[in-house]
Amino acid sequence: MKKACFKYQVDKNRSIYGQVILKDDGKISISLQDAKYFSYANKHQAKNLGKKIVEAGFIHEAIYGKVENTESSQGLKAQLIELTSDFKADYIVKVKEAAKNKFADFKEKNARSFEEWMIAWNIPMAEKKAPNFSAWPLSYNREYYKMRSKIDSIQQIVSAGFEKYEAKEVKAAENHYSDALAKLAYRLNQKGIIDGSDFNILTARVGVNIEITIKHGQEITKAWTIIAEGPIQKAHFRYLVK
């Protein structure tokens, strides 16, 4: 991961200050400081400058201060990736199972009538003028539009098909896994466990979770996963470090 602070000169007297981060998975994050009083166009141009800094390999005249580089954790992260590969495989299986169940739930909801949707969302309905007339909401309130958004979202997912939905869920899970390991490596760096130092990593499975024990010098650091899942909820996890 690389990080740099930069300045975008709006005009002779005004500047926007920001920070750009290039994550280990290739994603770019750009944040601007105290920019609420600038126009949308100014903020858009400042963010474009952040992207140009990344494209220039963090060699740019708009950068001020030191470019932070945490690539020293890449060796540690590589070890963590190797040692948690079985956990990742099981995690992806769980994500696929949840995707299958969730898609079946989407198909079931997609078959609902509009009246059934309103009943499920407790939307008050206007009195029908005749038995064969369609049901309509009593008022078009915020809850109604949230329901409509949900209906449209489910229709799009079902229309695209299960394969696309599963692929999207798996991709999100792989990104989550990579981000979690990058964050774990960073937190271990903060404890002095860095490339070039003397450390030994051991892993063990505890049910669906994994426990990582790292011996470095006279100290022992432990990290373990907390995983959550449900019948139609994709598995997600986070690392705790002690």
Image (tube, rainbow, N blue to C red):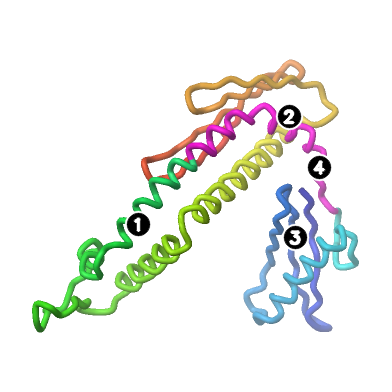
Kind of element beneath mark 4: helix
Residue 83 placed where, x, y %? 67, 26
Residue at which label 3 appears: 20
Residues at marks 4 and 2, CA–CA distance in whole angstroms: 14 Å
Look at 44% across and 66% down and name the residue there.
156
Type of the residue with mark 3: Val
* Mark nearer the viewer, 3 or 2: 2
Point out the tag, 4 or 3, that comes first from the N-terminus: 3
The Cα atoms of the two marked residues, 4 and 3, are separated by 16 Å
**Disc 1 target residue:** 107
Question: In the depicted view, which residue is nearer to us: 238 or 148?
Answer: 148
User: Is 183 included in the stretch rendered in magenta?
Assistant: no
The overriding secondary structure of the stretch rendered in magenta is helix
Image disc number at residue 71: 4
Specify few, some or many for label 1: CA neighbours under 10 Å numbering under 14, 14-19, or 20 or more.
Answer: some
**Nearer to us: label 1 or label 3:** 1
Q: Position of residue 88 (x, y in %)?
A: 59, 34
Mark 4 vs mark 1: give the one in front.
1
Q: Are marks 3 and 2 in contact (CB under 8 Å)?
A: no
Label 1, secondary structure: give it: helix
Q: Residue at x 39, y 49 (%)?
A: 102
N-terminal label among 1 and 3: 3
Q: Which residues are magenta?
A: 67-94
Q: Amino acid at mark 4?
A: Glu
> What distance separates the C-alpha of mark 4 from that of mark 1?
45 Å
In the rendered image, residue 83 lying in the magenta stretch gets the answer: yes
Of the residues tagged 4 and 2, which is closer to the observer? 2
Label 1 and label 2: CA atoms lie apart by 41 Å
Report the Cα–Cα distance between label 1 and label 3: 41 Å
Which residue is labeled 2 in the image? 79
